């Protein structure tokens, strides 16, 4: 009996201890005590002017491209440029052996001299016959024959001049020069190579890259959205053409600002996109044709925008953006938001918010729709994380804060 009584006493003591612990813990009440409301961090919403940008992908392209091809047949006598260097329009690039073309030119020049030598005699004969016809010393037929000979002599001179000009052009084409300024690439031929007029393979290619073009594409849906905002007066355009910045492949920002040059007048039927061309100064040739870039285009300022931190936004089953707010009765309510685009670490929201609304940004994991809460004003740092409570120290980290 003694053992049974001892066991019963031990069990009774353990039950008493558990009951005490349960009473101290508040029986499942909130963090502020039995029946207490959960504490959440909130920020007050307020309209603000937000500069809007559109970020689109694109590639760089040369302002001008010239493929160098020979215009006469011959053997490359010399290449006088350095591959990869900068050349100016008119600089000598290649010299084709001019021997045969010089001979043709000399022959054409001699033919011209011969034709010009026959011209004075034919002219003098016509002048003399013209005087003698009146004295009946020369027949009209003789005069006509003399005039015909003069016309033929003049035609021979004109033909000889044309031959000289053609020979001179071909001779000049033995010196291949740069048609534009720019960077010249590698040569596809060396000294001693045989080239032909207008061959398909270019001898070299010159690309003009200062300034340089950047061609980007954007969707027609985005174009309609932007135009709708402008037509409604919500989006205020800045004076002058839109300014454009570039983000390079390594994530760095290009130090020059570009300007919009032109937009395609049609939309692709297959992709639903249209092209935009911008132009950038490229003094140190940091941008090369074919580089992948992202262009950030400033389209204007939204004068009545709300910025909602991305940490406070969720998606419902339909994919719509939602966020939790503290209502006038200090209870949680969930709203569907109309988001336009991301601005840094926030969403630009156009519908679902009004001035003074208290958006919950911290403590989201411990609340539910309709739950009573205690709202504490907090501030967010530049990364969108809770920095501190308004008028005091930062609230104790919650599971939601640690996750973000």
Image (tube, rainbow, N blue to C red):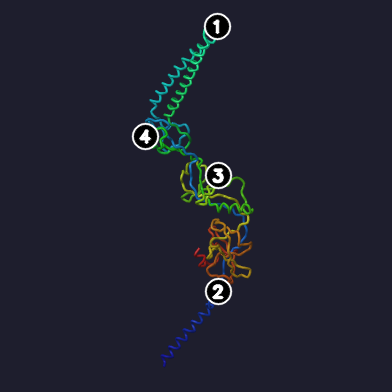
Q: Tell me if residue 399 comes above or below residue 132 in the rendering.
A: below
Q: Residues within 10 Å of mark 3 (few under 14, many from 20)?
A: few
**Which of the 4 image quadrants contains residue 136?**
top right
Coordinates of residue 125 in the picture (x, y in percent): 50, 11
**Residue in the foreground of this view, choosing between 303 and 234:** 234
Residue drawn at (54%, 56%) of the image: 344
Image position of 395 (left or right of 7): right
Label 4 to label 1, Cα distance in Å? 73 Å
Label 4 element class: loop
- Residue 262 bears which disc, if any? 3
Label 3 element class: strand
Identify the residue under disc 2.
30
Identify the residue under disc 1.
135
Coordinates of residue 142 in the picture (x, y in percent): 50, 11
Identify the residue under disc 4.
190
Q: How many marks?
A: 4
Image position of 198 (left or right of 362): left
Label 1 to label 2, Cα distance in Å? 140 Å
Label 2 to label 3, Cα distance in Å? 61 Å
Nearer the N terminus, badge 3 or badge 1?
1
Q: Residues within 10 Å of mark 2 (few under 14, many from 20)?
A: some
């Amino acid at each position: 009996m003694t053992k049974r009584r001892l066991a019963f006493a031990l069990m009774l003591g353990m039950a008493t201890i558990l009951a005490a612990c349960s009473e101290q813990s508040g029986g499942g009440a909130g963090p502020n005590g039995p029946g207490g409301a959960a504490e959440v961090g909130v920020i007050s919403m307020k309209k603000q002017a937000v500069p809007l940008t559109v970020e689109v992908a694109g590639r760089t392209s040369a302002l001008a491209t010239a493929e160098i091809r020979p215009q006469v047949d011959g053997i490359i006598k010399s290449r006088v440029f350095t591959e990869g260097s900068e050349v100016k329009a008119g600089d000598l690039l290649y010299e084709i052996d001019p021997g045969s073309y010089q001979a043709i030119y000399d022959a054409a020049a001699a033919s011209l001299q011969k034709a010009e030598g026959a011209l004075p005699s034919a002219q003098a004969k016509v002048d003399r016959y013209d005087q003698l016809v009146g004295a009946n010393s020369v027949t009209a037929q003789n005069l006509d024959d003399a005039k015909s000979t003069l016309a033929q002599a003049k035609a021979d001179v004109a033909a000889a001049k044309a031959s000289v000009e053609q020979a001179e052009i071909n001779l000049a084409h033995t010196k291949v020069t740069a048609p534009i300024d720019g960077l010249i690439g590698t040569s596809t031929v060396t000294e001693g190579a045989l080239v032909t007029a207008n061959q398909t393979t270019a001898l070299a290619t010159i690309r003009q890259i200062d300034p340089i073009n950047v061609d980007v594409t954007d969707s027609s849906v985005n174009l309609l959205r932007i135009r709708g905002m402008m037509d409604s007066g919500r989006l205020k355009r800045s004076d002058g053409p839109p300014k454009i910045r570039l983000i390079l492949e390594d994530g760095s920002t290009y130090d020059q600002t570009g300007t919009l040059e032109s937009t395609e007048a049609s939309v692709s039927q297959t992709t639903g996109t249209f092209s935009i061309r911008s132009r950038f100064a490229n003094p140190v040739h940091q941008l090369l044709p074919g580089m992948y870039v992202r262009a950030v285009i400033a389209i204007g300022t939204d004068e009545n925008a709300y910025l909602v931190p991305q940490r406070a936004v969720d998606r419902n089953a339909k994919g719509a953006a939602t966020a939790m707010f503290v209502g006038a009765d200090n209870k949680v309510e969930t709203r569907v938001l109309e988001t336009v685009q991301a601005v840094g670490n926030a969403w630009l929201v156009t519908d679902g918010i009004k001035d003074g609304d208290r958006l919950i940004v911290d403590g989201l994991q411990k609340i539910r729709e309709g739950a009573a809460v205690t709202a504490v004003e907090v501030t967010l740092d530049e990364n969108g994380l809770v920095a501190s409570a308004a008028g005091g120290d930062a609230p104790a980290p919650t599971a939601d804060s640690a996750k973000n």
